[in-house]
Amino acid sequence: MNHVFKALNDKTRRDILELLKKEDLTAGQIATHFNFSKPTISHHLDLLKQAELLTSEKKGQFIYYSLNTTVMDELLKWMLQFTAEKLPLTHKSKPKYESR
């Protein structure tokens, strides 16, 4: 899960995920949306793949990247456990002093 948080910590990588939410794209297509070199985009894609947030599939001479929603589902499930309603604290004894 540390790889996921590291990958999501960068705005460029989050922006790449936003692009891939709409459609599968090649690295070249992704690069056209940014003012970075292609090696920089490849580095971002590699980190997203290491975090398993992306999958890739070779079609002809191109590699298409797509979202791996399974990891996102697992991340959301993990995060939602912290929003579960907490049980109220119970005290076995009454306070000695009550304000009036």
Image (cartoon, rainbow, N blue to C red):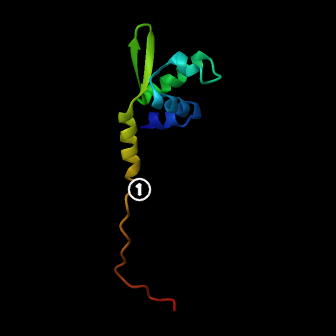
Q: Residue at x 41, y 37 (%)?
A: 1
Q: Position of residue 83 (x, y in %)?
A: 41, 56
Q: Position of residue 98 (x, y in %)?
A: 48, 89
Quarter holding residue 41: top right
Q: Is residue 3 above or below residue 37?
A: below
Q: Residue furthest right?
A: 35
Q: Residue at x 62, y 17 (%)?
A: 37
Mark 1: amino acid: Thr
According to the image, label 1 marks what residue?
83
Q: Nearer the viewer, residue 15 or 95?
A: 15
Q: Nearer the viewer, residue 63 or 23?
A: 23
Q: Residue at x 37, y 40 (%)?
A: 73
Q: Nearer the viewer, residue 68 or 9?
A: 68
Q: Is residue 88 above or below residue 2?
A: below
Q: Position of residue 95 (x, y in %)?
A: 43, 85
Q: Residues within 10 Å of mark 1 (few under 14, many from 20)?
A: few
Q: Residue at x 42, y 25 (%)?
A: 66
